[in-house]
Amino acid sequence: MAVDYATIVSADLFGLGTAASARRRMGDRFDILHGDYGDHVKAAVESENWLGQSVSAFKSRNGADFRERHAGQQLVGGVMRKGKIALVAAFLLAAAGGSLYGTGTLDQWQAARSLDSACGGVVSLADVQRLLGDEGIRGEEESSENYGVTPLVHCDIEWGENLPGMELRISKGEEDFATLHGIRHDTLRIPVATSAPIGSDWRGVVTNDLNDFTSATVLLECGAAAEYLWVQGWAYAFKPPGFQKEEKRVALARVVASAAKVAAEKWDCAAPPDELPVSGPPTPNGAEPVGLADASGTCAGIAEVAKEAREAGVHRVLESRADSVAPVEDCFLLNDDGEKVYRFTSLYDGLAATYRTYEGVGEESGATDEGLLRWVGSRCASAPDGLHVLAVLDSVLDEESVGFQQSALRALATVSAERKGCAVTSAP
């Protein structure tokens, strides 16, 4: 059986030392037995006091025994020499291991092996290193169940040089509440986590909040049924600038996207784009405000109701870049003081169905009793239906503002749905 370097440098040599000592004692016993036989038994047998057939038979057997004992002594001596050679070889390899450890080769090997074991063989060490740093990366398998679903992969990728680490989760199904919760879009009246597309034709987004949390999420279609492969990674940056830097957002998106490429092949899902993400536009939380007429991304529809918006106290927006495949779109409507007063969010693919199921939004369109959430659906020709939600972020509601909410929701949802090849189904 071949023995690799890692096995040798991590081996416990105590057992080999014990066996060598035992073999040495056995050789010494053979040496004593060999000497005693020659000094006592052989001399007695060769005396003239033995007669007849018995002396001939004994001399013949004695010669064989003598030769066997001598051969045993030589054999043990050979084994001892081989044992010594093995110990010397192990020592030299261990010394070489110290040199490899000093150059980081051993750490790289341990990191790759750890990630493969904990993360199902889908994570690229090179991509993780771009995000977390070159040294100290280790994977650890997480608990097997989240929100009633057993994921295909769930692992922690632990502390690196630059960031505390990240977590990766992969599951498969029509809906996945853990993913919706992971992007903090299960409660839309909290103006914290917002998303932006990862681009390069990927059906995915990067999501971050106002503090240290950032995630990247990718959805891949699986089979004829409305099943998805949900691939999501979270990371934290406790020190600025963290994920305010575009390169860090791109690095996180690439870790998740490269894992999705391997996972798609492993679990028989649609192949994702060949190119990994190369840009990381800011989410609305990190964007600069723009005027109503200048909105061209996820808030583009607001220009159609700009007059009503101003009358309702809305003067600017926070938006992100928009594309035709991102499963989440976010937009904030701001008052004259720059405060967030409304949030508009569109959910597509499995996320729309997940939100409806877990938030109890069954009707095609409607509003909560208190009027703080208003929604409308959209029908998509080649994908599951979409869902568009307008959330009130302050508690002041009057008849005039309700009219604006209905108009704004309709205008924003129409532009978003058309971008995805969908159509709004009914008036909000």
Image (spheres, rainbow, N blue to C red):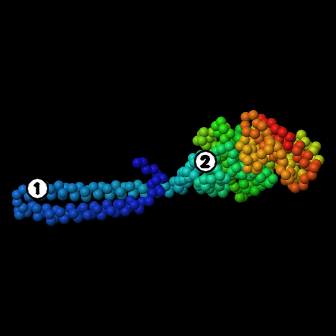
Q: Residues within 10 Å of mark 1 (few under 14, many from 20)?
A: few
Q: How many marks?
A: 2
In the rendered view, tell whether residue 51 sits above or below residue 400.
Answer: below
Residue at image coords 46%, 51%: 5
Left/right of residue 78 with respect to residue 403 in the rendered view: left
Task: Using the numbered discs, state the Cα–Cα distance from disc 2 to disc 1 in whole angstroms.
Answer: 76 Å
Disc 2, SS: loop
Residue 235 at x, y percent in the picture: 68, 53
Residue at image coords 13%, 62%: 42
The kind of residue tagged 2 is Leu
Q: Residue beneath label 1, please? A: 57
User: In terms of sequence position, does the residue under pointer 2 or pointer 1 come before the other?
Assistant: 1
Residue 415: image quadrant is top right
Residue 7 at x, y percent in the picture: 46, 53
Left/right of residue 273 with respect to residue 20 in the rendered view: right
Pick the quarter of the image with the C terminus.
top right
Residue at image coords 6%, 56%: 53
The kind of residue tagged 1 is Ala
Q: Residue beneath label 2, please? A: 152
In the rendered view, tell whether residue 300 sits above or below residue 340.
Answer: above
Q: Residues within 10 Å of mark 2 (few under 14, many from 20)?
A: some
Residue 272: image quadrant is top right
- Front in this rendered view, residue 2 or 116: 116
Residue 289 at x, y percent in the picture: 85, 48
Numbered label attached to residue 278: none
Tags 2 and 1 in contact by the CB under 8 Å rule?
A: no
